[in-house]
Image (cartoon, rainbow, N blue to C red):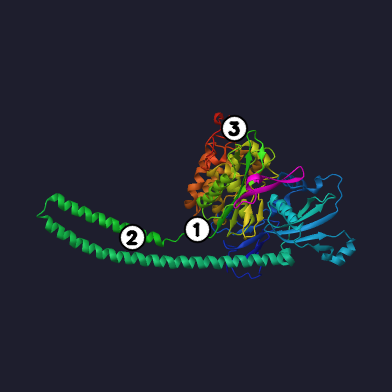
Amino acid sequence: MAGRVWLSSGAEFVPFDGIVGRAGGPDAEDAVLAGRNGIGLAAGWRESAKQPLVINAGAAAFSSWDEEEVRRRLVRSGTAAWRDVQGANRVASYEVSLFQLLPIAVERKRKRLSSYAEVLLGEVNKEVLSEDARYKPFVRLAARALYACGLDNGIVELAEGEQGRCFVARITLPSLADYRLGHWKEAVLRLEDELGAGVREREMDRERERERERELEQVRERGQGQGQGQEQEQEQEQEQVREQGQGQEPELAQEQEQEQEQEQEREREREREREREWVVTTSSSILIGADPEFLLLDGDGRVVSAARYLEGGHGAGCDAVVVRGQIRYPIAELRPAPAATPDELARNIRKLLQQASQRIPSEPPLRWAAGGMPAAGFALGGHIHLSGVSLTGRLLRLLDSYIAFPLAMIESSAEQSRRPKYGFLGDFRLQPHGGFEYRTLPSWLVSPLAAKAAFALALLCARETNTLSYCPAEEERYVAAYYAGDSEVLRGCLDQLASSMASTSSYHELAQWIEPLLISIRQGKKWDTEADLRTKWRIPVGSGEDRSPANHANRSVRVLE
């Protein structure tokens, strides 16, 4: 029975449902909950075509760290640790339990009682919180901390200081026994239901595929039957032509034979077209969306508020930031309709840029700027939305590996300063439409080439989550290089990334958008945050003058399109 959950102690696999009855352990349609002692899979399991979904694969490594190593990783990702707070009083404590980085319980811990009272009261010493205004910030902080430690499941203890700010006080792992109790058990049962539903859906897809193949074979057989009849007729016609040609000029007989050959080739092409019409498209129902940001800069490089022109707009609006304690809306944001392909989403974005261009006057002259941080203090995002796919820690680490890392290889050194406050790895947010928003990326509006590559790579990761074997976001040296802005070290994973994605079934379709980015990275190109983004998106720029800085054309940096 496929679609099962297994518990791994490192030495053996135990089916969560307790029904052993299947040899060989987990397969590609199962999930494994890793314990403190490791995954328990054979070496090279990542390279297997039948790798299961492994949840909490980093549990064994985490268990070996001391407090200082945990703190170091938290600080690197921009997560505040309680032990760094000097002289502060803890006014409240909370426990956030996460399963696949999503909350299954948020509890406020009451003031500590005596040991005897705690034994008597047990869980009464905790108060379960509902989804109020403070619930979401707690969950986001806990998920950020857990992800920074390479985990998917865990209990994050948060300490609240006197000023109301929360810090990470401790991270603990659920035991394998915990998964059979309370909200952990409920989470595992939901996972089993999801896995089972996925298995049934894939079986239905395979049955539809088999039915279409049968229909295609019938079309081919009919075509062959028609072709044989036509060949007999053509042979008779050719014989007549030869008989007639004996009394005709040789040139005329040759022309008639050529016409017949051309007609035969046209019929073969019609048959090939009929087959193409019956070929099943493998694209799934996964959709991609986005909400990229950009700035409006005047001739002196000062930010002009987008709210002057885009507030209340349809598809193009403005985003809020806090400036000296006040909420401002200086950042322009596009909200294109979702799409199934990179080209379609790029067209939707260009359409919104055209609409925004009509609303923003050409005088005074303004430069439209994007990238990670085109102006000091303004970190811009190029968030990508995915729907039709489940959020997992594995998918987030693939998005980090295949999109965030390559884009970090082409950004300028100035843009790297947005991290870790912005652009930290694994940044996500659930969306009302049922999908999620991947928030790590800088604003790729600066380059249509990079934008389309990011869209294609997002689709690749979503479709091939179970087949992409290489994941450098799980390797410490590359994570450290990302946060340090060391693009040279990051480029060390590029060839293996390219090889891994090229081995997937989706790559043939998506390569046209991905390979230009890979070529640009190998050529040492960087995207140009000093250019007006409208130029590369083919949006008219006022009177046509170049609004980039005066020294733009003289710079020696190789520029990405």
Q: Which residue is mark 1?
A: 283
Task: Mark 2 or mark 3: name the one nearer the start of the chain.
Answer: 2
Question: Is 397 left, or right, of 160 in this rendering?
Answer: left
User: Residue 99 at x, y = what percent?
Assistant: 69, 60
Eye-nearest disc, 3 or 1: 3
Separation of marks 2 and 3 at Cα, in angstroms: 57 Å
Q: Kindly indicate the quadrant of the structure image that contains residue 129.
A: bottom right
Q: Which residue is mark 2?
A: 271
Q: Is residue 276 above or below residue 404?
A: below
Residue under circle 3?
549
Q: Mark 1 belongs to which amino acid?
A: Ser
Type of amino acid under label 2: Glu
- The amino acid on which the numbered mark 3 sits, given as a three-letter code, is Pro
Q: CA distance from mark 3 to mark 1?
A: 43 Å
Q: Quadrant of residue 476?
A: top right
Give the class, few, some or many, for how many residues have Cα within 10 Å of label 3's Cα (few <14, many ≥20): some
Q: Nearer the viewer, residue 542 or 164?
A: 542
Mark 1 or mark 2, which is nearer the start of the sequence?
A: 2
The residue lying toward the viewer, choosing from 560 and 197, is 560
Whole-Å distance between the Cαs marked 2 and 1?
A: 24 Å
Label 2: how many residues lie within 10 Å, few (<14), some (14-19) or many (20+)?
Answer: some
In the rendered image, the quadrant that contains the N terminus is: bottom right
As for residue 369 lying within the magenta part, the answer is: no
Whether residue 319 is in magenta: the answer is yes
